Amino acid sequence: MRIFHLVCKDLLQISRDKKTTLFLLLMPILFTLFFGMLFGGSEEEQTNSLPTLGILSKDSPSTVVEALYNTLQSSGVLQPIFCSHLEEGESLLYSEKICALLVISPGFGSKVLMEEELPSCLLFFAKEKEQNHFIEAVVQTSLLRLWSAAKIAKLTLQMLESQKGAPQEPSIEVERIFKRTMNLWQSPAVSIEMQSASKRPSLPSGYDQASPGMIVQFAIYGLLQAGTALLLEKQNKTLSRLLSTPLTRTQFIVAKICSIFIVIFTQILLLILIGQFAFRVNYLRAPLATLLVAFALALWAASLGLFLGTIAQKQEQLTTWTLLAMFFFAALGGAWFPLEITGKTFAQIGHLLPSAWAMDGFQNIIVRGLGLESVLLPTIIILGYAFLFFGLAVWRLYDTLG
Amino acid sequence: MKIWTIVWKDLYIALRNVFALVMMFLVPLMVTGLIYFAFGGFLKEQPELPTIRVQIVNLDQPGPATPHFGEILLQIFAQQKLSQFIQSTPVADEEKARRAVNSGRIDAAIVIPANFSNALVSSGEHASLLLYYDPTKTIAPRFLRNILQGFLDGFTGSQIVLQVAKQEATNRKLTLDEGALQELANSYSQWIMARGQEFREGKPPWLHTKVLSSEKQQQKGVDFIARTMAGMMIFFAFFTGASMAESILHEREQGTLARLFTTPTSHTTILAGKFIGVFITVLIQVLVLLLSSGLIFHITWGEPPHLALAILALVVASSGFGILLLSFITSTRQAGPVIGVVLTLSGVLGGLISTGVQVPKTLERLSRFVPQGWVMSSWKLCLERKPLSALFFPVIVSLLWGILTFATGAILFYKKLD
């Protein structure tokens, strides 16, 4: 009963603070909206998230250049854009707005159609990167298809010439057959069917990264409000007063962790519901699994909050520690950007942290469309961290209370 | 003289406050450092294509005289060149492969259908190669698709060449015998195989790649990390501007402002001292961040005149905006949330936390409505080594923001103190 009263007191104290709603709910919602748009927004905007390839054509507009553009676009792996001049292409490349710059030499179109020798193209990269191999491979495939179509046109025309004599304007004929060949390539005998392992009916959207990311980030920030309750007890000496009552240290610690947990768990649940209904992130596909990850995340954040509350002497200290913890766990845990796109060491270190496991847990549900089984390992690891921080907090508290 | 006493007192307090120091210097460097680390900066490692784990289920059942193309595809994946990036394992059971993708143990499964070879050699038959992939992976499925596409294109071309020849012959009312068609198909096959050979031997002669020299890049380029650092510096400079202006509220609540009014010091002198304090603190923050980030992240910030203009734009805009913001606030209790919300939102709108990525057009337009957007523009131009004249417009707009917000804030503060 004493625990219950203490929890109610803390919750009342936290709920009276208007900042609570602002920072625990409003800010994560706005950040989710912003990052969601940045990561490609809804599925309709997904093509924007493809790596962009700049094309600088020094050739006059031709069927061949147009076909190259269309082939690259239909590859579904690169988003081509035309650059009007070298200066623009270089500037985009240097500022990493395009992943590579393909330079097409003058007369490229006519050489492809009429000459035996394949005209070479230049592909510029800004830096040495492993992904350059991938971009190069995509460009090679597209160029090869282009030359194959031109070769087919030339071979066909040669064969027909041998039967009926040369056409009056061979270049026009080659271009016409080239176009027809490129069209036929749109419906090949063997096609590739891309099937996502996700059981969800639609493509993942930018919000599938932003929403769980901001939940993880602001769950850590949420401990600031909660940790303040403990700090105030210390500063106002109400902690000493409490300890002069028959309240045991264990009851005090349990009450504190309960109140912090309730605040953060409520925050996470509300953000999950907002994610589900406002941003169409399907957390409720596996409600029990979502609840389990949310529970573990809230418990870990509460333990971390309790721990920081015990080591901080002033409000400013607590804010500082909380902000640093938030940036550290959020960035390394993949809440800002997927760990898949980061360096190997960063990703490996990141995956040691509970925030990365929380992201994994949420993404198993919302992106992969998996169920309860898939979140068991992440949950156990997060709970392990929760007990570790709880243990540290209890040790510090006993030290302080003693 | 009195003004400078007030300035030094405020500076002394600010630079002894650990929280302020953390927010002014440590947090911007830490956030940039984390991003720098994430993308391989400290360890000089580039983000790598992680090894793609793929299982291939070969269900191909070619007819008696048809080559086993499913096997050829398996061999291609096992080739030395691809094995750098792809760890492929042949498996017999499609369900097992799907389960492996579902559980995240592998990145993708390729299922070669039973009529794969037949569809590649006979016209009229259609087959579908299944690429079943983990949706959390962004690069692996695209990479695999491209390899498969390249492989299939060779065969597709062989079919198309016959299709086109027949159509063209029909259009010209010609009859092609089987021998001519066979010869055509052979010519194309030889040609495409030669191209395949060039590809397998290394760099094909028809595509040359070049990595731009780091020297040239340093001269002309805007490093991703430089933009990130600039964004963080602007973001936290605006916080410093507002937090320093908060000292007026602190003094009022603590009663030291009233005590100051009892001295023969005019309100104008007191406010001027406070405002100069804001300006100098932001300037110190910016200079320290520029120097430290230059040392830690090896950022070359640009030409001195460009840099001076960008610094001026930042310091004036952030100080003015901070003073205006605080002029609406009545207590330090209100200050924290108002500063936090207004500056975070305007910073986000100004594009300060999205400096490293391509921003949608709508967000780009919105950045023009907040001072942070204009200041960021100045810094971008400075980093891009644009001509000095290119900086004038964003710098002037930033200064106007700073001067107007400062003037309004100063008037409001003056009235409040009266």
Image: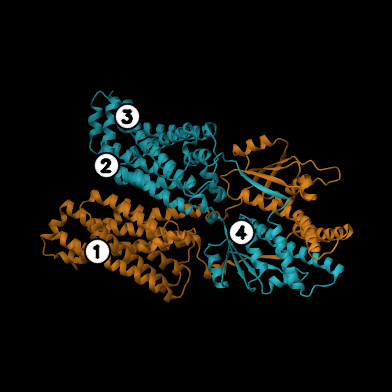
Chain colours: A cyan, B orange
Q: Does residue B55 sit above or below A242 in this rendering?
A: below
- The numbered mark, 4 or 3, whose residue comes first in the sequence reads 4
Does dot 2 land on a helix, a strand or a loop?
A: loop
Other-residue count near label 1 (Cα within 10 Å), few / some / many at <14 / 14–19 / ≥20: many
Residue A123, horizontal then vertical, whole percent: 64, 65
Q: Amino acid at mark 2?
A: Asp
Does dot 4 land on a helix, a strand or a loop?
A: helix
| Residue hosting label 3 | A255
Task: Using the image as rendered, state which of residue A239 and residue A363 is in the foreground.
Answer: A363
- Cα–Cα span, label 2 and label 3: 20 Å
Does dot 1 land on a helix, a strand or a loop?
A: helix
Q: Does residue A176 sit above or below B246 in this rendering?
A: below
Q: Amino acid at mark 4?
A: Gln
| Residue hosting label 1 | B275
Does mark 3 fall on the same chain as mark 4?
yes
Chain identifier of the residue bearing label 3 in the image = A
Does mark 3 fall on the same chain as mark 1?
no
Q: Is residue B33 left or right of A264 when viewed as pictured? A: right
- The numbered mark, 2 or 3, whose residue comes first in the sequence reads 2
Residue B381, horizontal then vertical, whole percent: 45, 69
> Residue farthest to the front?
B173
The circle on residue A73 is 4
Does mark 2 fall on the same chain as mark 4?
yes
Q: Amino acid at mark 1?
A: Phe
Q: Is residue B406 left or right of A262 when viewed as pictured? A: left
| Residue hosting label 2 | A17
Residue B178, horizontal then vertical, whole percent: 88, 57
- Cα–Cα span, label 4 and label 2: 52 Å
- Cα–Cα span, label 1 and label 3: 46 Å
Q: Quadrant of residue A213?
A: top left
